[in-house]
Amino acid sequence: MRYKTERILVNTYHALASLAFPRMPVPVPNVLNGDKSLDRLAEHLKNRGIQRPVIFTDSFFSTLPSFQLLIEALEKQDIEYKVFNEIKPDPSYEIVEKGIAACLEHDYDCAIAIGGGSSIDGTKMINGCAKHQLDPRKITHGLMSMWQLRRKGAYFVAIPTTAGTGSEATTVTVVTDETTSQKNALVSYGIVPDLAVFDPRLTMDLPPHITAATGMDALTHAMESFMSTYATKETDEMNLKSIKRIFEFLPRAYKNGTEDDEARSEMAIASFDAGKAFSKTLLGWAHGISHQLGAYYKVPHGLGCAIALPHVLQFALPNATGRLAIIADTLGLSGSTESVKAQAVVDAVFELNRTLDIESQFDMLKEEHVADIARNIIKEGNMAYPSHRDFESYRHLENFLLERRAYSH
């Protein structure tokens, strides 16, 4: 009875929010795109009078030749930078606090995030808290954080080196509580980067397995955003273009990413557009599942999304046949009825995973964890996931997860 009461309240909230949320003016970063974009970035910073940026990245990326391209560009402009290279996957409060201290020690006037989604997500939290002397542990409260961190931090540049997270365009970041391993979401217009920089030199050497996982993260963003009950004509157009791009160019980037600069560039655009779209629509259950796979089993976020997405689409199909059929038309998938077309989309996502050598199974799940995982997913998803189909009970979700541990499609 309690669960059903919660669902009534949540459905009422989403019905009201769907009228307002998609129409709110979400800030969009300016963009520098193309070869030598890092050199143009350094000139741009110099022209803005920026002299003391902190660069946020991870310890591995900071050793790569790609990272040196940024350093050389800044040094040519005599910009006095500091490097903070302690970002880790799914950054924790502890890392965020160290990053804040680095900003204050350097008397920073700009935050530059270069790397994957974790580097950009961590910098979103660090920058706003450092600028306004906020305690990150006290402001990570879902949609409430739109009020708690409403002011922008220092000038913020995001330089993605993967094509998938879309973090360079979104109002969302996630930080991990190291004491519980749970991920907490921050939503704020104030954390959106001021500038996104896409330099194809940074993604060409991305390993195939990371190309696959981050690309499927972008596809999950686009599909769940399109399937959201908050979707609008504007977001539909962005998401359908992203979905089509990803189906065409992700297999190419996976198989020949070191040479196919067109595939890399098209995936960067797809990821960016999907990120812009889901800032207006929010996401769906595949993300909630992925967050828990990461918390309990250290499954990388993009891989978790890839595993969960086709199962969530199959689950949504009875209530979202028409929406899935539109995706089928975009992808050129044939079918005599909307139901047949909708199933063709689900099948196509399973097949895309196979092409990328990703197993679409929750085989890492341990039965003793499933009850807690289901409750965590529901807790996160109640307010965050305006979906066409919800789970009828905690037990319904538990059974859904257990049935897919050894699922074969």
Image: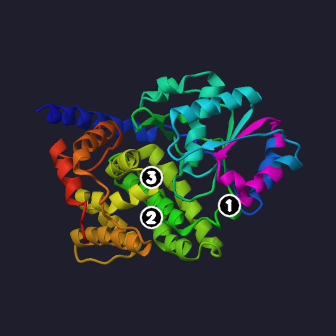
Tell which residue pokes out farthest to the left in this image. Answer: 1
Please name the residue shown 50% across and 44% down the image. Answer: 90
| Image coordinates for residue 281, horizontal then vertical, percent | 41, 46
Given residues 26 and 78, the one toward you in this image is: 78
Judging by the rendered image, the residue that carries numbered circle 1 is 202
Q: Quadrant of residue 19?
A: top left
Earlier-in-chain disc, 1 versus 2: 1
Instruction: Decide: is 155 above or below 213.
Output: above
Check disc 2 and report its element: helix, strand or loop: helix
Given residues 375 and 391, the one toward you in this image is: 375
Check disc 3 and report its element: helix, strand or loop: helix
| Residue 318 in view in this figure | no
Q: Residues within 10 Å of mark 2 (few under 14, many from 20)?
A: many
Instruction: Decide: is 353 above or below 401.
Output: below
Judging by the rendered image, the residue that carries numbered circle 2 is 243
Tell whether label 2 touches label 3 (CB within 8 Å).
no
Q: Which amino acid, by three-letter code, is at mark 3? A: His
| Image coordinates for residue 91, horizontal then vertical, percent | 53, 41
Total numbered labels: 3
Given residues 301 and 315, the one toward you in this image is: 301
Q: Nearer the viewer, mark 3 or mark 2?
A: 3
Check disc 1 and report its element: helix, strand or loop: helix
Q: Which amino acid, by three-letter code, is at mark 1? A: Leu
Earlier-in-chain disc, 3 versus 2: 2
| Image coordinates for residue 403, horizontal then vertical, percent | 19, 59
Judging by the rendered image, the residue that carries numbered circle 3 is 301
Using residue 109 as the reference point, say whether residue 355 is left or right of it: left
Using residue 299 as the reference point, say whether residue 266 is left or right of it: right
Given residues 221 and 124, the one toward you in this image is: 124
Point out the stretch of residues depicted in magenta: 46-73
